[in-house]
Amino acid sequence: MMKKQLLMLFVVFALLAIPLLPTAAQDQVTLVVWDNYVRDAEQAMIETLHAQFEAAHPGVTIQRESYETSDLTTLLPRALSDAGGPDVAMINQGVANMGALVAANLLLPLNDYADQYDWWSRYGMGLHARNSVVADGSRIGSGDLYGVSNIAEVVAIFYHKDVFEELGLSIPTTFDEFEAMLPAIKEADYTPITFGNLDAWPGIHTYGAVLHSYSTPQQIDDVIFGNEGATFDFEGAHLSAAKFKEWIDAGYFSNGFEGMDNDVAAFGEFANKESAMWLAGSWNSGPIIASLGEEAVGFFLLPSAIGAETPYTIGGIGLGYGIRATSENPDLAAEYIDLMTSSDAAALLFENDYLPAVAVDPSVLTEGTLTADLVNAWNTISSGNAVGHYLDWTLPDAGARIQELAGGVVTPDEFVANMEADYMALP
Amino acid sequence: MDSAFRRPFQAYLLLLPGLVIYALFVLLPIVSTVRYSFYDWTGFSDPTYIGLDNYAELIRDPDVLKAIGNNLFFVIFYTIIPIVLGLFLASVMSRGRLKGMVIFRTGLFVPQVMSAVVVGIIWRWLFTLDGPINTLLQAVGIEPRAWLGDFVFAPYAVGAVGTWVEYGLCMVLFLAGVQNIDEELYDAARVMGANAWQQFRYVTLPGLRQQIVVAFVLTFIAALRVFDLVFVLTNGGPGKQTLVTSMLVYEETFERNRAGYGAAIAVMLAIIIVVVSAAVFRYQSRQDAEMV
């Protein structure tokens, strides 16, 4: 009797457990994705694309984990070494990041997939070079492709249209015109250029933009990609450092910039219209549009100081989607990347105030909006092969060095000498 | 009473859970860090044994020297000033009878228990150009200044925040110590005509010697391993004016992918801390021996 009851109980439980068994026949696959879309506003956008992907691939579930870029960069090397790590992950460029991952054989070369899906035509080859790494990971700019990006960025100048109107200024077409505006703006009691450098990285953008204006793409490419004979000690570096310091001494940047943080104080100064311009990255457009709307603020490129037709400035493509070398589903991962970097995805990114890396159809732009200015600025430098670089990609101390220059503890020439010494000391 | 000693097996069994956790999360990482310091290793590549090369590099690395120098500068603000301030507050609070003493004491201790990140964010705001500190100084005729971005003043500004965090610990330690000083000693001192300063100098101070040593070692370690507060306040800047050793460990290990070199710097920092702490305790026990 007792035994019978136990048997019955066992049978009942066994029947109950059937739905819990893995349905191996249906080929359930989980694609693990790590990205940096942490903001609330971004969730709907990514989930729309994921729903599309899952609908097109029955049995596939996307498992997404999102981190701030700096956390993502720190966590990825260990995660990609792990068999259960992400199949697809957004990889930060640069020798210290993508380069080190390639050196440790953690990433899959994407060249075959790029041929198959024609990723090469997504944007210019000069931009693909940023996601390319030589086999031993020691240099970027050539070698196999390890990432495909979906977002673009430009460092240029946000300006208040009504302040320009009030002072009778128009968008400068030459560097001299730009420079001539600065004292006029200061006299009218506006800060000419907002700059908050407490955290050191904004200097890489603000000084960096002046440096690019004084440089040719070849000169900066050489430094960043470590080409033969590359040097930071070139005329444009000296001239730009001197010009940057001259502007600081003349008070053309925010008062007390050295103790001002970027995200709250600098943004606040510009948003409150205490300044006329903000030399900053295009990714700041979201908060600007949110607080001032599409029409109040415009965006233009800092003109070349050496007379180049297309202004050369810092810009680039955002983190690139890469595939873990040991992923069990590389084909599926490639299909995922194809979707996330497609023009459909670009349209969705654009709707959400992002600047997509893939060219946006001009017909969707509304003239006179900040978004249109951003797209035009990107198209100008992207098609003109004038997309520059962030110095800290190869010179990790660049931010501290620029603070030394700005703080006057070194002369512009000493600054260049220190940067060159750092550069020569690189492994 | 000594049943535990008669059954050592059970005593060890009771210790085991704690020991396992300690071994897993403290001892093992220490041993691993020392081992990594002998390798050229990105943190995820195949490590290459390079002997003492990392150590040879770090003694010639100007950043390491600069960072240790900054840490030693912070000892003034993390250790010396808090101890002096703590002694002052403890002697005032224990001798006088102020109303609302408990609220006062709790309030003064709050900075010690707050998260360093929260402290950092608060002080970043306090130090802004149009923030409360500059407004206050302007009222007495001092020009506003970007404290945290100033090459001269940033180390002092960061140090001052350190003082604000650490003095509460010293104060509480000394307050507890003062309670243990025999009241008769003060009575005797008073009878002999000692004024408040003399009572402090000849009764309170010798009575607190042990607490001072403990406070010194705790705050000294805090000054040498500080990371979060500086990371939030200045990120080591301007230039490298507030760069500290633990920040360098972080940068080398996670930003420059030189985990072996980062480990070597960490080991060096640990050795400095252990040597100084051991020297201080040894000095104290010798003093105690002399007093008996």
Image (tube, coloured by chain):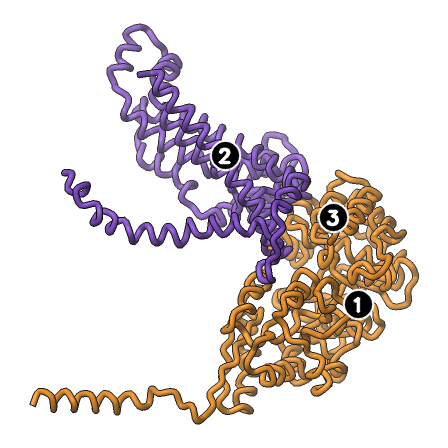
Judging by the rendered image, the residue that carries numbered circle 1 is A387
**Chain in orange on the image:** A
Rendered colour, chain B: purple
Badge number at residue B78? 2
Badge number at residue B201? none
- Residue A302 position, x and y percent, is 82, 61
Judging by the rendered image, the residue that carries numbered circle 3 is A402
Q: Is residue A373 visible?
A: no
- Residue B242 position, x and y percent, is 61, 41
In this rendering, position of residue A143 left or right of residue A83: right
Relative to B221, is B205 above or below? above
Q: Chain of mark 3?
A: A
Furthest residue in direction right, as rendered: A307
In which quadrant of the rendered image does the N terminus of chain B lie?
Answer: top left
Could you tell me how far apart the alpha carbons at marks 3 and 1 are, in whole angstroms?
A: 21 Å
In this rendering, position of residue A123 left or right of residue B220: right
**Callout 3 and callout 1 share a chain:** yes
Residue that appears at 55% across and 91% down: A56
**Callout 2 and callout 3 share a chain:** no
Decide which of A89, B262 is in the foreground and name it: B262
